[in-house]
Image (cartoon, rainbow, N blue to C red):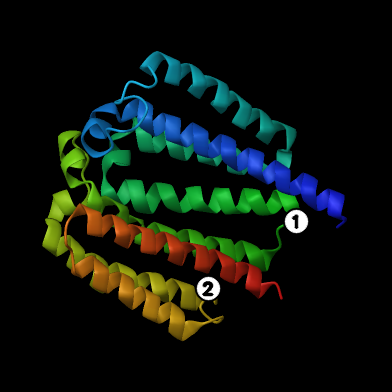
Amino acid sequence: MSLQSIIIHSACVVVWVTFFVYFADLSNQITGVDEDRINKPDRPIPSKLVTLKGAIGRWAVVLSSFIIIGIFYPAILPETLCLVAVVAFLNLTPAGNHWFGKNCIALTPGMWALLSGCWKINSPLDLTNRSYILTVAVWTGILMPIQDFRDMKGDARVGRRTMQLVYGDITSRRIYACGFVPAAYAVLRVGRLADIAPIPLALTHVYLAYRTMNHDGPRYDHKTYMHFTYLFCAVVASIIVKQK
């Protein structure tokens, strides 16, 4: 692939992902104003930097643009429509407010669609790399409940049924640390992504479980969530290393 082609395809990835992130974020903010007044009062709508009507207008433009990109690039149309469906599921259905529906059911296909679409824009997606992307998607879906440990007050107010509100904070942390984290690492082993660095990846999972159990308030939980995002970047990078 020529340098010019690489630049063009990379730019297309950036545009597609940017429209998706903007669309998903607007959808979340438009439907989650009450929650944001508690958890994230500095966001544009609760802080009155943007009106709800203005946000809805932007949302319509961004959603239309995102779908048009999928139409002009038919190879990623399934992924584009999948991402739209995931966002709708999360924001418009009762199941999207349940911890299992939100984190495990919705975000697994959502992550698959996002990674698959980015790959297809750059090059054809073979069976091996499809398997790697599916592995990352399942791994992400298993570990994503970690994001809910920091937003319990807002979740309770809007009626969201996170694991913490269903089973209690301490019990949820035990389930996550002793069940979900080992299961996620097992997925990486089965999907052969842990072959790159099995011991460091195992230790980072143990550290994630430790931080989950060693809770010290929402601020600490947010830092734990950020550690998960760093681990996510490392796991995605392992797919690139596998190409060598």
Badge 2: how crowded within 10 Å, few (<14), some, or many (20+)? some
Residue 55 point in image, percent of width and height: 43, 21
Question: Dot 1 surroundings within 10 Å: few (below 14), some, or many (20 or more)?
Answer: few
Q: Quadrant of the C terminus?
A: bottom right
Q: Is residue 227 above or below residue 102?
A: below
Residue at image point 30% right, 67% down: 180
105 lies left or right of 41: right
Considering only order in the chain, which callout, 2 or 1, is on the residue closer to the N terminus? 1
Q: Amino acid at mark 1?
A: Pro
Which three-letter amino acid code belongs to the residue tagged 2? Gly
Q: Quadrant of the N terminus?
A: bottom right
Q: Is residue 142 visible?
A: no
Question: For this view, does 243 lie left or right of residue 153?
Answer: right
Residue bearing the label numbered 2: 191
Residue 63 position by quadrant: top right
Residue of label 1: 124
> Is 87 situated left or right of 121 in this image?
left
- Label 1 sits on a secondary structure element that is loop
Name the spot of residue 168 as percent of width and height, x first. 11, 56
Q: x and y percent of residue 134 in the render? A: 54, 61
At 37% across and 58% down in the image, what residue appears? 226
Front position in the image: 17 or 94: 17
Disc 1 from disc 2: Cα separation? 20 Å
Residue contact at pointers 1 and 2, CB within 8 angstroms: no
Q: Residue 90: x, y in percent? A: 37, 38
